[in-house]
Image (cartoon, rainbow, N blue to C red):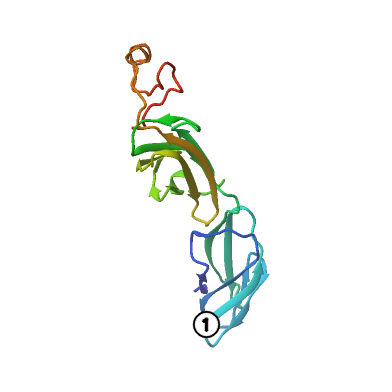
Amino acid sequence: GPPQVTITDPVEATVLNTKSAISVSGTVVEEFAVTVKVNGKAAIVDQAAGTWTVSTISLNEGLNPITAIARDPAQNVGSDTVNVVVDTTPPIVTLESPPAGISVGESPVDVSGFVNDIIPGTTIQADDVTVMVNGVQAVASHKSWTANGVLLQPGANTLTVTATDPAGNSSTLTSLVTLEQDLLMDEDCFEALGMQHLCSPGAITREWTKGT
């Protein structure tokens, strides 16, 4: 029968954050001498040990299929393929609520926004990104995220949002929010807008809807 060839390193769905060439290794089971090529490049085969290795397999951004083909003297062929993902791009993260520069009248607050980290040709989506807000882990779903119960101190507060993708790339943004204990609810504003919001005495600083 054909040689039984297996790629053992890297494993399927490995995610890397560099385009540097990698080494690929594996095993081959065949009683006769075999040749092994990986993405067209000849591997060094240790017939007695049943192993093989090849260095400097180049990678591109996105999905990289790596295929090992073993061939015996009778031209019987066996193959194995694993997919490696290269992601060198940090996720794009935005903070939508509460808006930057706003004054709020209560703590804790729910903080929410959007994140995008789709890698073409892979199943990696924005929901695979970890988003942290001042130490609180957000829940991500359908490219949006919400961190519930972020504590504020009286006065100016910096909200630090960090998004980290499965490859380890991260991006950070900051936003300033002020906690003013004496902000008043303005019933006229409430009736006009029909939603929960906070107004400074005499004027709407900015509408703010709590994340749900």
Position of residue 181 in the picture relative to residue 73 (left or right): left
**In the orientation shown, which residue stands out farthest toward the bottom?**
48
Name the residue beneath numbered marker 1: 50
Task: Give the answer, above or below, for where 104 lies relative to 207.
Answer: below
Q: Position of residue 198 (x, y in %)?
A: 38, 24
- Viewer-side residue, 173 vs 64: 173
- Viewer-side residue, 45 vs 61: 61
Residue flagged by tag 1: what amino acid is it? Answer: Gly
Q: Position of residue 83 (x, y in %)?
A: 53, 59
Residue at 40% over, 38% down: 111
Task: Give the answer, above or below, for where 25 lies relative to 211.
Answer: below
Tell me the quadrant of the picture where the C terminus can be found: top left
Label 1 crowd bin: few (<14), some (14–19), many (20+), radius 10 Å: some
SS of the residue under disc 1: loop
Task: Give the answer, above or below, for where 168 lies relative to 56.
Answer: above
Q: Position of residue 86 (x, y in %)?
A: 58, 56
